[in-house]
Amino acid sequence: MPDRSVPIEPGKADGGFRPPQFVVRGGIATVAQLEAGTRHSINGYGFSVQTAPGLSVYELARGGRFPNRQISVTTVEALRELGVTINAPTPGAGDHHGTVIIPYPPPPGLFESLSRCFAQRSNLSALA
């Protein structure tokens, strides 16, 4: 019997749902911590994170080798809603280094919005 299946566009087999791509940063992403960690680098003007498609928060934290007891977590999608981009992979520390690229100079209130975008969690990889 011939195959009469309808070809499905790549990534659409699940109705277009894609799991979130997590973004992890060591420590608590306060306004001051984000401002202090933002700089010009070969990756652009921004700050370092760990991110990669399909990886869990735990895998990203373990790959980042964060000594912090707390980590900050968001998603690529949530950051894009704030108008920032994520370049990954980029050169830097950790197994899944990426850079959150922000406008230069940063618009007023951007670091406050970024800080609110991150949720804090225990760093289970540091406690293991």
Image: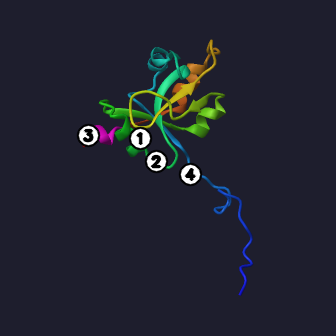
Q: Disc 4 designates what residue?
A: 19
Q: The residue under label 4 is which amino acid type? A: Pro
**Residues at marks 1 and 4, CA–CA distance in whole angstroms:** 15 Å
The span from disc 1 to disc 2 (Cα, nearest Å) is 7 Å
For this rendering, which residue is in front, 102 or 116? 102
Q: Nearer the viewer, residue 113 or 60?
A: 60
Quadrant in which the N terminus is drawn: bottom right
Position of 108 with respect to 54 (left or right) is right
Of helix, strand and loop, which mostly describes the magenta segment? Answer: helix
Number of residues whose C-alpha sits closer than 10 Å to that of mark 3, classed few (under 14), some (14–19) or many (20 or more): few
The residue labelled by disc 3 is: 127
Q: Amino acid at mark 1?
A: Leu
Residue 60: give its label: 1
Please give the name of the residue rendered at 46% of the width and 47% of the height, measured from the top-left corner.
55
Report the residue marked by disc 2.
55
- Left or right position of 5 against 52: right
- The structure residue drawn at horizontal position 51% and vertical position 37%, both measured from the top left corner, is 74
**Mark 1 secondary-structure assignment:** helix
Q: Is residue 123 above or below residue 19?
A: above
User: Are discs 1 and 2 less than 8 Å apart at CB?
Assistant: yes
Q: Position of residue 39 (x, y in %)?
A: 50, 15
